[in-house]
Image: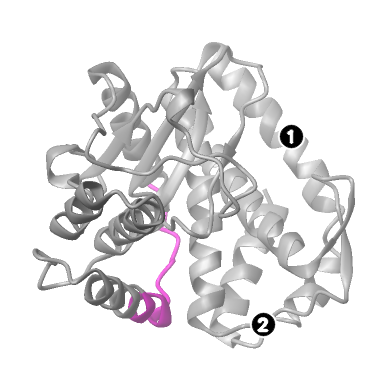
């Protein structure tokens, strides 16, 4: 498969990663902070920060000191080699998921008791990263899909739930069906949300919530923030799916082909509103990224 890589480079995002990572390490007074910050350091520093804050609230000095000594949340002991660099693949027990005012959805923090996912799940995820990279999404997955938390194993055709939260950028939570082509689609979707959250923050774009737009995915009107997120993340999965389809067969091919056809119909209903929503994005480079992906998906 020879396809053009999608350009996800946005200089302010790299600046954001370096600045926030440095600030977190300074706040933690980290004993072993890396000399050179990367997107992976940025992701892992947020796990260390949230873990340290949780430990501080419960007066758990031992765990608090552990995070100070491990500003990468012990990632070096957990990594899985992939086509986009070392990744952390975990399969947390549902009972180990946290619920708090930090997020509407449950989440998991890397910590002193974290173990890497079983070997077959690491292999599955590494293959998914490779498929995403080959389809042109290496830049997105490298910087915005550092930690993959595999949740429920389901059957092809079941409803798959995936999410990400702003407090843990670069971390993805998702169900899976044991198929790397489908898992890559969902990693790309959530990495897209992570990218856009960082991009909006890095470019200091404040989107008005006064104007709403109809979202065909939620079947309701949503503020511009949610509408633009959907009009970015779903088109990314459409582009990926169209590119990977020729290399799939059997039930996987049928499933992805049906998904792409469904998404074509949904996205078409956003064609008139999307330019109006884009007008609320004040950074021209970010606006062009969002426009080009939406346009490419519309033309599939």
Label total for image: 2
Q: Is residue 274 left or right of residue 137?
A: right
C-beta proximity under 8 Å, tags 2 and 1? no
Q: Is residue 211 magenta?
A: no
Asked if residue 108 is positioned above or below residue 28 in the image, the reply reads above
Q: Residues within 10 Å of mark 2 (few under 14, many from 20)?
A: few
Q: Is residue 8 magenta?
A: yes
Q: Is residue 192 left or right of residue 143?
A: right
Which residue carries the number 1 mark?
261
Q: Quadrant of residue 20?
A: bottom left
Which residue carries the number 2 mark?
206
User: Overall secondary structure of the magenta stretch?
Assistant: loop
Q: Nearest the camera: 295 or 95?
A: 95
Q: Which residues are magenta?
A: 1-16
Q: Is residue 136 left or right of residue 110?
A: right
Q: Nearest the camera: 217 or 137?
A: 217
Q: Secondary structure at mark 1?
A: helix
In the picture, the quarter occupied by the N terminus is: top left
Q: Position of residue 168 (x, y in %)?
A: 44, 55
Residue at horizontal 45%, vertical 36%? 184
Give the mark, 2 or 1, whose residue is nearer the N terminus.
2
Q: Nearer the viewer, mark 2 or mark 1?
A: 2
Q: CA distance from mark 2 to mark 1?
A: 33 Å
Q: Position of residue 205 (x, y in %)?
A: 62, 83
Q: Is residue 273 left or right of residue 118?
A: right
Residue at horizontal 70%, vertical 58%? 231
Q: Position of residue 50 (x, y in %)?
A: 39, 56
């Amino acid at each position: 498969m020879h396809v053009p890589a999608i350009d996800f480079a946005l200089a302010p995002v790299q600046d954001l990663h370096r600045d926030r990572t440095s600030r977190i390490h300074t706040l933690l007074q980290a004993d072993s902070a890396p000399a050179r910050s990367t997107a992976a350091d940025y992701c892992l520093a947020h796990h260390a920060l949230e873990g340290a804050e949780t430990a501080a609230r419960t007066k758990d000095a031992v765990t608090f000191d552990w995070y100070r000594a491990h500003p990468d949340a012990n990632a070096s002991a957990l990594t899985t080699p992939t086509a986009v660099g070392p990744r952390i693949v975990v399969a947390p027990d549902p009972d180990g998921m946290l619920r708090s005012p930090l997020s509407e959805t449950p989440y998991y923090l890397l910590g002193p008791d974290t173990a890497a996912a079983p070997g077959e799940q690491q292999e599955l995820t590494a293959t998914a990263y490779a498929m995403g990279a080959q389809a042109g999404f290496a830049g997105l997955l490298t910087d915005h899909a550092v930690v993959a938390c595999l949740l429920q194993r389901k059957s092809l055709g079941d409803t798959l739930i995936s999410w990400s939260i702003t407090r843990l950028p670069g971390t993805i939570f998702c169900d899976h069906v044991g198929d790397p082509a489908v898992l890559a689609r969902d990693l790309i979707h959530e990495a897209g949300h992570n990218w856009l959250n960082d991009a909006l923050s890095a470019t200091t774009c404040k989107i008005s919530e006064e104007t709403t737009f109809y979202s065909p995915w939620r079947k309701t009107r949503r503020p511009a923030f949610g509408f633009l997120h959907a009009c970015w993340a779903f088109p990314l999965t459409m582009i990926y799916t169209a590119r990977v389809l020729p290399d799939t067969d059997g039930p996987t091919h049928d499933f992805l082909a049906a998904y792409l056809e469904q998404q074509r119909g949904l996205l078409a209903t956003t064609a008139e509103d999307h330019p109006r929503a884009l007008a609320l994005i004040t950074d021209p480079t970010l606006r062009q990224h969002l426009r080009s992906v939406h346009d490419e998906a519309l033309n599939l």
